[in-house]
């Protein structure tokens, strides 16, 4: 059984007040949220909201201007990207990181520092469709199969936190509908904390515990996924009218001490 809790029993990942951007201009400001073992947190928002930048900043690939990241109970030096990976906090990028000329089996080999047949078998059991494709060049695999491989590769290293950027990019809705529940099951069964960056709001929230909605680089709404699903109007307002919405007086909101776990001060929090 993998060790899936922070030594202090707290969340696996704590992002606190993270501000980061490009050429000195912040693209995300004061981002805060937590991810516990077995929990799925969706980071949602319109194009350009700062979702990808958030993930890149958490792993240090976009240098932070302010804020901190704590993984497994210990502060992380976000200026050293490999440190987080060593702790099992992995980013699955939206470009899938695959080599079209190599086979699925080759990718499995490259993804493991030391071959671990037992782990390999366990990961293949999670994505049985890959079993019959081990000898196939990845360039000849479908988009869904490539995406399964991308996630399978990340799982080989027994991650504690998996951050998945736009898993559904370019995939048919049916494939997304099949894959997202697998991610949910994976989180629960292996105690992995999952951060999903998604465009499919309803689908993402339907497999998430909590949702964080970004607009213009700020958290404008957050809450339990079931509450966000029940308050679709508020979610739409957060997407399309964020400037007016941020900090509004929503019952159970941050000003009321409402729950939500991000610690953000200006975001509204949907009431439980
Ligand atoms: N390399 C870069 N250099 C300068 N600005 C960038 C760079 N990458 C992203 N940005 C800007 O940062 C902001 C946030 O972009 P980001 O890609 O994080 O948004 P996103 O929510 O992931 O968008 P999408 O859903 O379209 O992928 C945007 O205004 C974008 O133009």
Image (cartoon, grey):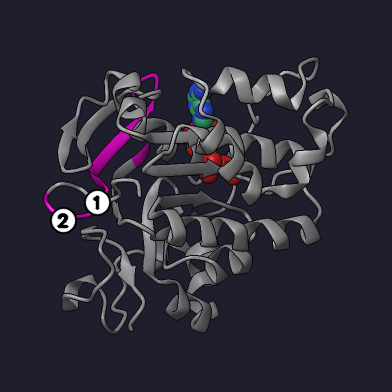
Ligand 1 within 8 Å, label 1 CB = no
Side (left or right) of 238 relative to 269:
right
Residue 95 location, quadrant: top right
Q: Is disc 1 surrounded by few (<14), some (14 to 19) or many (20+) residues within 10 Å? A: many
Q: Is disc 1 placed on a helix, strand or loop?
A: loop
Closest to the observer: 12 or 252?
Answer: 12
Closest to the observer: 48 or 96?
Answer: 96
Q: Which mark is residue 9?
A: 2
Q: Residue furthest right?
A: 140
Residue 18 placed where, x, y %? 27, 39
Q: Main secondary structure of the magenta part?
A: strand
Asked whether the viewer can see residue 239, the reply is yes
Closest to the observer: 186 or 73?
Answer: 186
Q: Which mark is residue 5?
A: 1
Q: Which mark is residue 230?
A: none
Residue 91 placed where, x, y %? 47, 34
Region rendered in magenta:
8-28
Q: Residue furthest front?
A: 118
Query: Which residue is pictured at 37% across the width and 50% down the height?
Result: 218
- Tag 2 near tag 1, CB within 8 Å: yes
Query: Which residue is pictured at 29% across the width and 67% down the height?
Result: 247
Closest to the observer: 119 or 154?
Answer: 119
Residue 209 placed where, x, y %? 42, 68
Q: Is residue 103 above or below residue 265?
A: above
Q: In the image, is residue 194 part of the stretch drawn in magenta?
A: no
Query: Which residue is pictured at 36% across the width and 43% down the height?
Result: 160
């Amino acid at each position: 059984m993998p060790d899936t809790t922070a030594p202090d029993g707290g969340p696996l990942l704590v992002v606190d007040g993270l501000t980061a951007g490009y050429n000195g201009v912040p693209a995300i400001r004061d981002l805060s949220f937590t991810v516990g073992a077995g929990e799925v947190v969706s980071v949602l928002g319109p194009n350009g909201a700062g979702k990808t930048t958030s993930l890149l900043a958490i792993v240090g690939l976009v240098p932070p201007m302010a804020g901190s990241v704590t993984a497994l109970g210990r502060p992380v030096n976000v200026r050293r990207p490999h440190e987080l990976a060593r702790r099992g906090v992995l980013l699955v990028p939206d470009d899938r990181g695959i080599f079209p000329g190599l086979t699925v089996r080759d990718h499995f080999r490259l993804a493991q520092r030391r071959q671990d047949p037992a782990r390999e078998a366990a990961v293949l059991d999670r994505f049985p469709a890959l079993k019959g494709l081990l000898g196939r060049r990845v360039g000849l695999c479908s988009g869904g199969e490539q995406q399964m491989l991308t996630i399978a590769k990340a799982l080989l290293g027994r991650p504690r936190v998996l951050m998945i950027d736009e898993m559904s990019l370019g995939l048919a809705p049916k494939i997304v509908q099949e894959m997202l529940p697998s991610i949910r099951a994976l989180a629960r069964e292996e105690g992995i904390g999952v951060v999903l960056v998604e465009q499919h709001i309803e689908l993402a929230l339907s497999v998430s515990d909590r949702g964080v909605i970004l607009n213009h680089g700020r958290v404008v709404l957050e809450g339990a996924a079931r509450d966000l699903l029940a308050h679709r109007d508020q979610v739409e307002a957060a997407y399309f009218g964020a400037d007016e919405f941020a900090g509004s007086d929503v019952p159970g909101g941050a000003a009321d001490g409402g729950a939500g776990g991000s610690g953000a001060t200006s975001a509204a929090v949907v009431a439980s």
